[in-house]
Image (cartoon, rainbow, N blue to C red):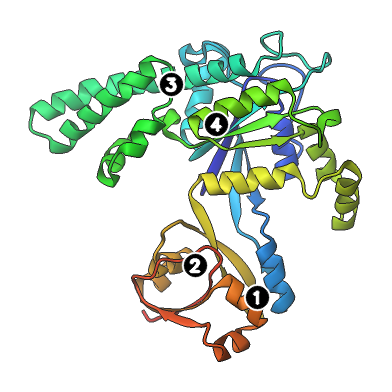
Amino acid sequence: MGFSCGIVGLPNVGKSTTFNALTRTTVAASNYPFCTIEPNVGVVPVPDPRLDKLTELVPTMQSVPTMMNFVDIAGLVKGASEGEGLGNQFLGHIAQVEAIAHVVRCFEDDNVVHVEGKIDPKSDIETIMTELALKDLAVVESNLKRSEKLARSGDKDAKVLSEILKRVLVPLNDGKSVRPIVNELSDDERKILKPLNLITAKPMLYVANIAEDEIGQPYNDAVKVVEAIAAESGDPMVVLCSAIESEIATLETDAEREEYLEAIGLKEPGLNRMIRAGYDLLGLMTFFTVGEKENRAWTTPKSSTAPQAAGKIHSDMERGFIRAEVIGYQDFIEAGSESVAKEKGKLRLEGKEYIVQDGDIMHFRFAV
């Protein structure tokens, strides 16, 4: 599936509408719970004006942005961890993604039924978090029994896992996320815990979904509640109106979209911010390759070495890596071309230990 961000929330909060706008698809979005049963997956380009700028300087046959996957997961309800509303099935879908975008309803609309009968972001968030924590709790308790048994037989990894699971039980018993504890673990400990695929260990992005008439206005009380909860947990928040985003997505040309955005007082679609936030949430960054045939943005985890970045293009390039020719993005823009950047001494030759920087323009030398 690649890098994936799952869109979750209670029924009728705007998940499928947001997904449709993101992917410009027509997934069913209706005014009743569980409209989405199976998860829908959409591949979405990551908006990056740097690629556009590079293509202005380096004419090419095609310009290819980097991509990420968004997954529209059915709405959860209270009792989902015990199977309510097909909850076990839906929670299983969430366990497969790498990050979570939690859509929270922050608008009033008598025509759109709220599953709890009222707009209460705090309660909505608590419902989702409790169900996620209960699902993780069942996984942890089951694996703790197994790992303790193996630890007694001398299995060192099982002993380490047992100690980790005892620590994460504490927040889960309180219906809270395990991320603060996971963030304190060593890399080796995270590798041991990772196969459990704990949902509350995944990074979270809050998406506050507002009404059309609140675009460009100060945050309403509901959004302020989401903002406070996100700030307390250290999670990012994006505010958008899924109804407006859907209208923008139906426009066919850039000129039409720009005119519409200007008319409603926005510089860019809210979904652009959501996509970039999701990309950053996954701990990703972008490097570029440029040339006559193709200018392309590539995705690699932050702190990747040059060979690891080369491997994102082709495994042979990582295996036979010799060196990387690197120009920093800003140096390239100021020079205006690769040749001028070379003349100014801005092109560097980097070896296997080089840590790729976000925005690097790279050319890899390799032999296999």
Secondary structure of residue under mark 3: loop
Q: Which residue lies at the image location 50% right of the left edge and 21% below the top edge?
A: 129
For marks 1 and 4, give the one nearer the viewer: 4
Q: CA distance from mark 1 to mark 3?
A: 46 Å
Residue 308 in picture, x, y percent from top left: 40, 64
User: Regarding mark 4 in the picture, which secondary structure is present there?
Assistant: helix
Query: Exactly how many numbered labels are in the figure?
Result: 4
Residue 242 in sight in this render:
yes
Query: Circle 3 is placed at which residue position?
Result: 176
Q: Residues within 10 Å of mark 2 (few under 14, many from 20)?
A: some
* Cα distance between the residues tagged 4 and 3: 15 Å
Circle 1 residue: 333
- Residue position marked by numbered label 4 in the rendering: 231
Q: Nearer the viewer, residue 329 or 189?
A: 329
Could you say which is closer to the camera, residue 351 or residue 8?
351
Q: Residue at x 65, y 78 (%)?
A: 334
Q: Earlier in the sequence, mark 1 or mark 3?
A: 3
Tell me the crowding category of disc 4: few under 14, some 14 to 19, or many 20 or more residues within 10 angstroms, Cα based.
few
- Whole-percent x and y of residue 179? 40, 32
Q: Earlier in the sequence, mark 4 or mark 3?
A: 3
Evaluate whether residue 105 shows in this view.
Answer: no
Q: Are marks 2 and 1 in contact (CB under 8 Å)?
A: no
Q: Is residue 131 above or below residue 319?
A: above
Give the mark toward the camera: 3 or 2. Answer: 3
Q: Which residue is disc 2 drawn over? A: 313
Residue sitting at x 37%, y 21%: 171
